[in-house]
Image (spheres, rainbow, N blue to C red):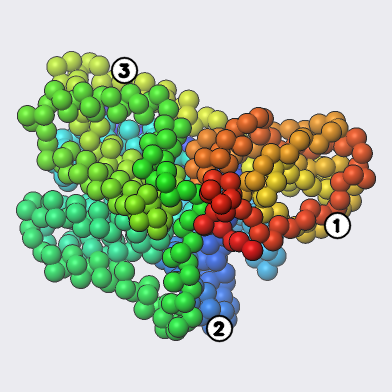
Amino acid sequence: MQPRRALLLLLAASLAARLLLAAQGGQYFFGDEERYHRGLDLYRALAEARWADARGLLALPEHAAFVWLGALLGPLQQLGAWSGGQGDWTQPAHIYASAPWAAALLGLFSTGCLWLVHRLALAAGADEPAAFAAALLAACSNTLFYFSRHLLPYDAALGAWLGGLLLATRPGTRAQLLSGLLTGLTFHLYNGYWFLVPVGGLWWWLRRREAGAAPLMWAAGAAAGLGLPLLVGTLAGGAFYWTVLRDFSGTVKQGLFAEGWSLPWEYLWHAEGWWGVLVAVGLAVAMVRGRAQLPRHVVHALACAAALYLLLVLASTVAQKFVIYGRTVRPLVPLFCLAAGWAAVHLTAARPVWRLPLAAVAALAAVTMFLPHYLRVFPRDFEQRMLADFGMTKRTLEFSGSIYRPLALPVTRPDLLLVNAQFLYPLRGRLPAPDGEVLFALDHPLAHPPFQYEGHTPRERALLRAGPLEMKLVRPADPAAWPDHLPVPLAFGDADRPDGLDRGRPQP
């Protein structure tokens, strides 16, 4: 098959997989997804000429460029919502119901990252088979797949960064300026990717001879990418903007600083499993065998991966400034794919006939890892299904200490109990399961181990894994023993600290 046709088929299959996943629902599971909704609010405010509201939204610094992106995608989402009878956005329920359309649009960025890996590999010096192998490995990565159903900024930010790396390989001042601009904007698409700006600078420095040295242009572009959202925010909010930005920068502390050096590898093991280990071993073997002819782009990719990991460790375990999450680790994967794509071609150079079976193994691994995501039901969808079938029930959790989301409607079925139908965070301890008849039960999404690396501590992960983790509808043996509303915790601690407190969470 021609290389271009093979790449198009790979991208088409990857996009179809992401669109299907988006259609399955699951949006608004993570709290950060509400920031996409802020973009929709900005779109509506601008469309309705509510300038004061728009200014207030522009004065909020958290992932500001992602809010702008949400405003740009809003008209397309609403257009898709009209086809499903949900285009009247004066009704908030219609906006939330059209979330799969938003996830489908964001899925374009996820698929675009795969194309960028291919283009980056070619531009950096890989041949066509190695570039396709890199794109195939990225397409088969669970880490780069399962977030695509959620309204999160990670893929848009990763795409901007990869685009910056690609432009950094091209000569000319315009390409260098745009490279710096995209690299700087990466931070404002997702503030948690602050470390990608210096790593992008390292990639430019390593590639400067191939692209032609233009340090002032790249630096000017990066300054513009970093500075433009700051300027907009300052004009909109003044001192308020900088106060919120300062406070927001100190919130990346949900977890433990001490595991910053180990969490990336533990997370990748749970996300990629045996396939990830096989790829890592293949890369190591190829590097040993081909150390005398190791391509420059492989050396550069691994150098950037090492620098990225070092920055994460320094910021977490050493400086104790930022906690590491699973989402923080994702940019390592495209860099590893660039190197592993070369390794796959190098190891099969003597017997190219093995390449097709290896591609089939990669596809099998992808199917094995991706399929459970299509069967997964999230709390919001579970709750809506139970509400439609049974009415508003009482609620409870099998964990103490979690932030409770109060009921929005009066209880109409006091004889029924909805259990664990929300995001479970933070966790103090595990409570006994309610005594009664289980009418319906599904695995909670947090039973999927990679989700447990988005802020939970090792002790909390142990609690989640201590027994079955399910969302349930229960007919309790004694309905009167369960109140209509759970108490809202005012403060919560964490036993991972010697003093029982978690430095990253509110305290009395």
On screen, residue 222 above or below 133 = below
SS at mark 2? helix
Quadrant housing the C terminus: bottom right
Query: Which mark, residue 410?
Result: 1
Q: Residue at x 10, y 55 (%)?
A: 208
Element type at mark 3: helix
- Within 10 Å of disc 2 (Cα), the crowding (few <14, some 14-19, many 20+) is few
Check disc 1 and report its element: helix, strand or loop.
Answer: loop
CA distance for labels 3 and 2: 60 Å
The disc, 1 or 2, on the residue closer to the chain's N-terminal end is 2
**Residue 357 shows which numbered tag?**
3
Circles 3, 2 touching at the beta carbon (< 8 Å): no
Task: Where is residue 364? Give x, y as percent.
Answer: 42, 23
* 1 and 2 marks in contact (CB < 8 Å): no
Comparing 191 with 182, the one in front is: 191
Of the two numbered discs 1 and 2 in the rendering, the one whose residue sits closer to the viewer: 1
Q: Could you tell me how far apart the alpha carbons at marks 1 and 2 are, in whole angstroms?
A: 34 Å
Q: Tell me what residue is drawn at x 49 percent, y 43 percent.
A: 453
Q: Is residue 347 above or below residue 14?
A: above
Query: Which of label 3 and label 2 is nearer to you?
Result: 2
Measured as percent of width and height from the top left, residue 73 is found at 48, 61
Which amino acid type is marked by label 3?
Answer: Pro
